[in-house]
Image (spheres, rainbow, N blue to C red):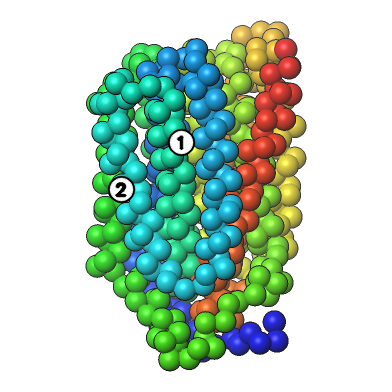
């Protein structure tokens, strides 16, 4: 740490401080008129859209490609999640050690997504002529490349959002929530039309094609905005001053950001339990089938997540009195919501005494899922928005983009492993 040099003052942050202040108390409509904010928001959508495309098409892969009963159908989701989370942790760590070229990473990652989903768009027309093992290998390869592309884009986007200011970090967070709401809403609406497994080739092609379009739109907006210029000062420093290539030590970043990155990690670990309960808690009294109720719950959670991210710029959360340590306590407090899920109709184990109590039970469960979503989005957005203010230079802020992503991906990986235990507990409850 002794040979680490702070570097120049926060040149880029100061350059955008006026833009940040203008957006601080602005409505979402006003923020969307700011090109840089809109670009960060669309990048946020692009970060989660590929993952949601894989999830949305999982029933198609299991039903149409691997025919439900094969071993490939049974291991598809668990293998996809393992490859995605583990590769993300490893790649984010590698990226965070290479603290330069952040703007290039944004575009490069998006190009990888365009390639992956362009190939998947063709795959839906040719998979029947290929053996199952080759289809499975191809799909897992695309999951791997897509995960690396997302990690690369997220690393660059969060690094530059940190030097633009908290409002732009929130833009990325809100974009991710939007990408969560739309697919779950579509699946809920589809549940009223027919069997969600019976997805047409045209529908799956639209899933994958939309990912390509979103990524292309991100690149176009990125090129016409001023986001890429935020990396130029760092590049010139590296060319003119060899000492500028010295990396920001992880120990320094952890010392400054420990409570924020621990909040991010804890939030994702707890949140990864949500799908376990959402997929195994059944309707008691509302006039819905489980095939409709479960997609509805996913939509409710995602709407809560979006709302939680949208309110994260309220003065209460951005006040200096709402310290990183309080943010960490907030993330820990969410654990208290988990036992409440066992109070509801897990695997039809709960039998309310009357139709009225059954309806009340369903409504309380919906409220609980909404609260779980709100607190997820709120803690994450507040944590990422506070990163910039804890650091002293643009170099540190850019390095923090990769550093925070390590804890994000580690939280997802650990949470996915913990979800196996909770799956066993939930399935054993009858």
- Res. 300 visible in picture: no
Q: Position of residue 162 (x, y in %)?
A: 50, 69
- Res. 121 visible in picture: yes
Quadrant for residue 403, please give it: bottom right
Left or right: where 67 falls relative to 382? left
Q: Position of residue 96 (x, y in %)?
A: 55, 65
Tags 2 and 1 in contact by the CB under 8 Å rule? no
Camera-side residue: 56 or 267?
56
Q: Residues within 10 Å of mark 1 (few under 14, many from 20)?
A: some
Quadrant for residue 171, please give it: bottom left
Camera-side residue: 412 or 316?
412
Which residue is painted at 74% across and 55% down in the image?
329
- Which residue is labeled 1 in the image? 140
For marks 2 and 1 on the same chain, the one whose residue lies earlier in the sequence: 2
Q: Is residue 190 above or below residue 312?
A: above
Q: CA distance from mark 2 to mark 1?
A: 16 Å
Quadrant for residue 261, please give it: bottom right
- Residue 114: which disc? 2
Which residue is painted at 30% across and 64% down in the image?
222
Which residue is painted at 63% across and 38% down in the image?
416
Q: Secondary structure at mark 1?
A: helix
Q: Position of residue 407 (x, y in %)?
A: 63, 56
């Amino acid at each position: 740490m002794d040979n680490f040099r702070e570097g120049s003052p926060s040149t880029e942050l100061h350059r955008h401080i006026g833009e940040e202040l203008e957006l601080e108390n602005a409505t979402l409509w006003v923020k969307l008129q700011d090109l840089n904010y809109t670009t960060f928001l669309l990048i946020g959508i692009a970060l989660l859209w590929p993952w949601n495309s894989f999830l949305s098409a999982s029933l198609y892969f299991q039903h149409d490609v691997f025919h439900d009963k094969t071993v490939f159908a049974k291991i598809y989701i668990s293998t996809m999640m393992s490859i995605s989370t583990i590769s993300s942790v490893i790649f984010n760590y590698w990226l965070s050690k290479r603290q330069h070229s952040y703007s290039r990473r944004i575009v490069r990652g998006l190009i990888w997504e365009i390639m992956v989903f362009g190939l998947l768009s063709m795959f839906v027309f040719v998979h029947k002529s290929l053996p199952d093992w080759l289809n499975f290998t191809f799909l897992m390869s695309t999951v791997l490349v897509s995960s690396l592309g997302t990690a690369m884009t997220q690393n660059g986007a969060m690094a530059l959002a940190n030097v633009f200011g908290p409002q732009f970090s929130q833009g990325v967070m809100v974009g991710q929530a939007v990408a969560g709401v739309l697919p779950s809403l579509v699946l809920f609406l589809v549940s009223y039309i027919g069997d969600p497994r019976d997805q047409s080739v045209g529908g799956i092609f639209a899933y994958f094609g939309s990912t390509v379009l979103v990524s292309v739109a991100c690149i176009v907006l990125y090129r016409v905005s001023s986001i890429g210029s935020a990396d130029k000062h760092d590049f010139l420093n590296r060319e003119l001053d060899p000492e500028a290539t010295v990396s920001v030590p992880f120990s320094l970043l952890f010392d400054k950001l420990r409570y924020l990155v621990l909040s991010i990690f804890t939030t994702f670990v707890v949140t990864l339990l949500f799908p376990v309960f959402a997929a195994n808690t059944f309707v008691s009294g509302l006039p819905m089938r489980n095939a409709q109720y479960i997609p509805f719950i996913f939509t409710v959670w995602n709407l809560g997540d979006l709302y939680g991210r949208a309110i994260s710029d309220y003065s209460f959360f951005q006040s200096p009195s709402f310290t990183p340590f309080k943010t960490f306590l907030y993330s820990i407090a969410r654990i208290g919501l988990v036992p409440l899920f066992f109070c509801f109709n897990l695997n039809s184990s709960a039998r309310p005494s009357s139709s009225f109590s059954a309806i009340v039970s369903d409504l309380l469960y919906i409220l609980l899922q909404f609260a779980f979503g709100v607190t997820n989005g709120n803690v994450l957005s507040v944590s990422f928005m506070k990163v910039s203010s804890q650091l002293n230079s643009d170099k540190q802020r850019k390095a923090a983009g990769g550093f925070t992503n390590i804890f994000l991906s580690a939280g997802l990986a650990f949470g996915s492993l913990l979800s196996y235990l909770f799956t066993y507990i939930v399935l054993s409850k009858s």
